[in-house]
Image (spheres, grey):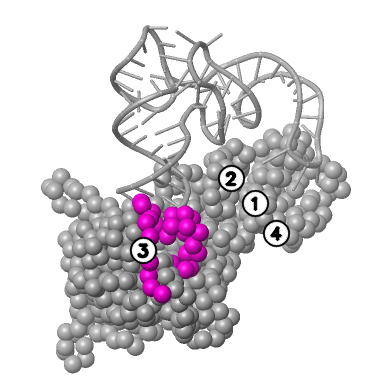
Amino acid sequence: MRWSKTLIPSLRNVPKDAEAISHQLALRAGLIRQLSSGVYSYLPLGFRVLLKIIQIIREEMNRAGACEVLLPALHPAEIWKKSGRYETLGEDKIALKNRAGHEFVLGPTHEEVITDLVGTNIKSFRDLPLNLYQIQTKFRDEARPRFGVIRTKEFIMKDAYSFDADEKGLDVNYQKMSEAYHRIFTRCGLKFQVVNADTGMMGGKMSQEFMVICPYGEDRVASSEHGYLASQDIAMRGNPSLTTPAPKSGKPEMFDTPNLRTIDEISHRYKIQPSHMIKTLIYMADGKPIAALVTGDSEVNEGKLRKLLSLKELRQADGHEILEATGAPVGFAGPVGLKIPVYADWDILGIADAVTGANQKDKHLKNVTIGRDFKPTATGDIRFVKDGDSAPDGKGKLVLTTSMEIGHIFKLGTRYTESIGAFFLDEKGERKPAIMGCYGIGVNRILAAAIEQHHDIKGIQWPEAIAPFHCEIITINQTDEKVVKVASDLYHELTAAGREVLFDDRDERAGVKFNDADLVGIPKQIIIGERNLAQGKVEIKNRRTGETQLVDIASLKSHL
RNA sequence: CGGGGUGUAGCACAGAGGUAGUGCGCUCGGUUCGGGACCGAGAGGUCGUAGGUUCAAAUCCUAUCACCCCGACCA
């Protein structure tokens, strides 16, 4: 590809307000262009990277025994309604209507359509197992697109769905896919780890996330040096078994806090450590109010609380419900005198003489001590883990790292096959729903992750396997006939030999071309200038190591 | 959906009631040319959009839209 005939923008001349490194470099190196919030065009350089990634995914899916299909981006809402997920899709869903008034969903995910498709095509256990995948654009009306290409409204996903006759079969497929994912991400040059994850709204029994550690991910992973590894959403911690210190005070005392509702406001105003405050949150648990207590510097993990209490539904109470449950408006709840069940995090056992809400408008209490002034219904691990918490196995401490999710695999079970209808007859002639697994990869995120993990101050250092080109030919002086002749001969020769070559044939100064080449990050640079040409030599530079070598033109190919 | 911010040339920004500006990029001419050159001459904008105040609005007011950031949310 000739640089001058390609849509590569002027690389010095690109917005520099981007947050994530991958976003900034993707813009500056001419891979992408923003169209609107969370929607990007891929320019030739970026698109070639996507194609490389897609090719690797195809090869590995094939090895894992999956078959490629292509499902429509528009799904009849009827199918979604059957799964029960349509109503709850909420913000995520982009719906359209046709002229007849029928509603369509612009596919945020494809469990429903694939299950419908498979359901009408399988009859017998002999038709299983089945593993189908596609690589397709997904649309999600993300509330907040972020970090450039890392979270977008429109993105390319490889999604695979397995259907099995029994649990054992699902385990086999799940394992195969897990191995395929390991190979894919390794081939793409990524360092990653696999963590147990929350199954979230998808339901199902088991799921694992493939996480890439980088400073601009949205997710946090908790790990211990003894091998504990889990997403922060579900990470547990060891019981610190705290004993409550003896209170220094006699009894709780009320004080005025006009219009001070948040932990921040009170800790600032009265110089109290947030860790010495009891944050009291009111939830509606299966329709009944409960209180959850954590220290002021912690956050309640609703997922953990829900599990601990075996609840179906848990949501934050609204202002009206809080007033009813505590007798005070939002911001003044506290455990003392509360009539509803109170669940305290273990941390609360470790503080005496704490500050908390008084259940009266504009009032808080100080000198509140657990056990003496209130008795929780139960204590447990109900907050998000923090750096330095002890690991749940009691061995070592937890460390949190920021990371980006690039793949997710689920054992779904029969949720969709039952509701949408994908049944088969087993050996005994019994009608059974197929057992399903689903497996997703964010293709664009691999591109972002690769940049996050492979760059330096000058630009991108593409891993060989997904670099947009194998090498870049740079002419030092595009007006020198001999240089141009040698360069374009070489370009044609290498291209004919199957090498992917970018030919920087612009009439720019050498410095500009060198800097652009380093920014774009193609692994090998072939530098052609009259000085070396006089000796019949050209220079090869390795982008990653910076090493250069002078070689004879004739022997160039053997050096690439 | 809540809180904050920004919309002026392709990009980054300045202008805070009275010829529409600067830097980079772009075009042309010349000198240069192995790590982001220099000189000279140009082209390019109904100042996001709509309404209002005013003799006069990029500037003040109102509404609206877009984008960014922080939260809420999130396969």
Please tell me whether mark 1 or mark 3 is closer to you in this view: 3
What residue sits right under mark 2 in the picture? Answer: A28
Cα–Cα gap, marks 2 and 1: 9 Å
**Whether residue A311 is situated above or below residue A517 in the rendered picture:** below
Could you tell me residue A121's position as x and y percent?
22, 73
Tags 3 and 4 touching, CB below 8 Å? no
**Is residue A252 found inside the magenta-colored segment of the image?**
yes
Cα–Cα gap, marks 4 and 2: 18 Å
Q: Is residue A404 visible?
A: no
What residue sits right under mark 3 in the picture? Answer: A254
Circle nearer the N terminus (2, 1): 2
Asked whether, in this view, residue A243 is left or right of residue A252, the answer is right
Cα–Cα gap, marks 3 and 4: 64 Å
**Secondary structure beneath disc 4?**
loop
Tags 4 and 1 touching, CB below 8 Å? no
**Secondary structure beneath disc 3?**
strand
Q: Chain of mark 1?
A: A
Circle nearer the N terminus (2, 3): 2
Cα–Cα gap, marks 1 and 3: 59 Å
Asked whether, in this view, residue A380 is left or right of residue A494, the answer is left
Please tell me whether mark 2 or mark 3 is closer to you in this view: 3
Q: Chain of mark 3?
A: A
The residue lying furthest to the front in this view is A250
